[in-house]
Image: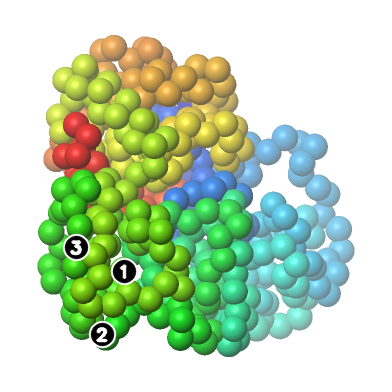
Amino acid sequence: MWNPLRAAVAVPTTIAGSLALSLSALPATAAVPERAAVPELGALARTAPSSAFTSTAHEASLPASAVRTAVTAPATYTVRKGDTVSAIARRYGLSMNDVLSRNGLTVRSVIYPGQVLRLTGAPASAPAPAAAPAPAAAPAPASSGSVYVVVRGDTITRIARAHGVSTTALLQANRLAVSSIIYPGQKLTIPGAMVPASAQTPVAQAPAPAPAPAPSGSTYTVRAGDTITAIGNRFGVTVDAVLHANGLSRSSIIYPGQRIAIPSPTGLTAEQTANAQLIIRIGRQLGVSDRGIAIALGTAMQESGLRNLSYGDRDSIGLFQQRPSYGWGTRAQIADAERSTRVFYGGPHDPNGTVTRGLLDIPGWQSMTFAQAAQAVQNSAFPNAYAQWEAPSARWLAALG
């Protein structure tokens, strides 16, 4: 989150690997600043691995008691929950670049509890060129048979990067689509692991026909070459939604001639559907265009998984992960999903008045891209992550609005 008041003059803040923001609007969220090379995928739980780099704005806001006097640096340091490379460097009187270079890291690297960092000695390797950053240091790639258990805050992108595999490979290994929801406790197979034959859903590999939305309650007859993933993509629903609608598991075998029930194209849970309907209803009341409503839906999905959460990064809560400490309202007010939605839209009927700035208050938002418009309100450390929800938001609006 940035300055809680709409200042007449925007104060630029330069953050390596994060977004440089010039808007004076208050962000609804201040997620751990890690710029993803691939948009974040999957729904959110809320405790993520520590970023190798945190914004100077965030560190400047730390209370004096949290700033430790520099002491002689040990040869190595074991990362603890909440650590960042910049905080570790400051603690021992080092520059962040020293720590990054000695461990072969870049500002995009993810560090994790238990990781051992070198604090003294020569650099591990030469820094990567700015135009082509070296791959982030991460836990060793998973060996055959490796399974990862999802924790709060995980996303498919972060898990893939942490294990040195591509997002696409991780999705394919677990029969997931880009719109699939992951949840704490879920077990994911890391590519490179041998998947039992019984877990293979394809009858034969063949290109899936172009996507075509299906009405709720329809059925589909499996053909040679079909997979659950391909069927889900074809009808605009998640793999999990198709499995649940048919009483199947990820180890189930499908076969030609089998009839598969196609769930609602929204692929949303009852809770998500109710919140989406609320966002649509309020948007209609305020006279917001369909595109503006879709932006609100996509923003809420990115920030909270379309859930009215009572927790988040630091003091962020609610559908849009707005922060009491930055003027978006009291915790009780932000927990009111209807009020927080009106605050996101903003405009002349904004419950916050001029304290914060919503979508309708952003000059020229209508000509911005989907992600740019959402980012103009949220000021997130992941400005491109909203783009992945543009197509799903349009489907949700068409189905529910």
Image quadrant where residue 344 sits: top left
Residue type at mark 3 is Tyr
Residue 179 at x, y percent in the picture: 34, 56
Distance CA(mark 2)–CA(mark 3): 18 Å
Q: Please name the residue that numbered disc 2 is placed on.
A: 205
Secondary structure, mark 1, is helix
Residue 226 at x, y percent in the picture: 24, 76
- Among the two numbered marks 2 and 3 on one chain, the one whose residue lies closer to the N terminus: 2
Residue type at mark 2 is Gln
**Quick check: 103 above or below 55?**
below
Position of residue 217 in the picture relative to residue 85 (left or right): left
Local crowd size for mark 2, using a 10 Å CA cut-off: few (<14), some (14–19), many (≥20) = few
Count the labels in the image.
Answer: 3
**Quick check: 44 above or below 10?**
below
Q: Please name the residue that numbered disc 1 is placed on.
A: 228
Residue type at mark 1 is Ile
Nearer to us in this view, 300 or 204: 204
